[in-house]
Image (cartoon, rainbow, N blue to C red):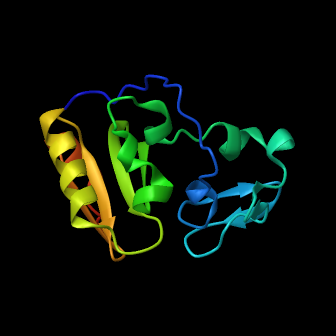
Amino acid sequence: MTKVEIRRTKRSCDGCTKCCQGHLSGEANGHAFYKGRPCFYCSEDGCTIYADRPNNPCKTYSCSWLNDPTIPEWVKPDKVEAIISKKIIKGVEYLELVEAGNVMSAKVLSWFVTYGLSNKLNLLWEVEGGNNWIGSNEFLNAMKPQENN
């Protein structure tokens, strides 16, 4: 599979706060956020501590839509209610697509799988709380549940 590269774009969040609304997980200044629990600092107007937000995860999070010009404009997270992120598991890179609001549309999922297959990428996507993945043998092995001894 091909390594996922980040190429900077001139895009901006421009009001999108999907990464902060309880669809991803992390901690900001001692306040945990995770699936179903938005960031403590996320408001309807955006981040209330944006100028002083912590490096990790706030400044270091890399929204793939924001940073990869090969991802179409129409796939902006607040428009499609889904977030694409570059991830690594056991040293293997992949793209993850998670629902960020309503059930993901077939159009978004179809685009994601077609994009991944045509670029030979490892992919993981979530639909209605269930995870699915495709990719290299190395990736498939990394995704296998750990066997109990």
- Name of the residue lying farthest toward the top: 7
Q: Quadrant of residue 72?
A: top left
* Quadrant (top left/top right/bottom left/bottom right) for the N terminus: top left
Q: Is residue 36 visible?
A: yes
Q: x, y (%) of residue 58? A: 69, 45
* Quadrant (top left/top right/bottom left/bottom right) for the C terminus: bottom left
- The tally of labels here is 0
Q: x, y (%) of residue 139? A: 24, 45
Instruction: Answer with left or right where residue 28 lies relative to residue 141.
Output: right
Q: Nearer the viewer, residue 90 or 135?
A: 135
Instruction: Answer with left or right where residue 113 lies relative to residue 54.
Output: left
Q: x, y (%) of residue 63? A: 50, 42
Q: Nearer the viewer, residue 51 or 137?
A: 51
Q: Quadrant of residue 39?
A: bottom right
Q: Quadrant of residue 133?
A: bottom left
Residue at image x 49%, y 23%?
A: 8
Q: x, y (%) of residue 111? A: 21, 50
Q: Nearer the viewer, residue 84 or 111?
A: 111
Residue at image x 69%, y 38%?
A: 59
Q: Is residue 141 visible?
A: no
Residue at image x 40%, y 59%?
A: 80
Relative to residue 102, is residue 63 depicted above or below? above
Relative to residue 116, is residue 101 depicted above or below? below
Instruction: Answer with left or right where residue 113 lies relative to residue 42.
Output: left
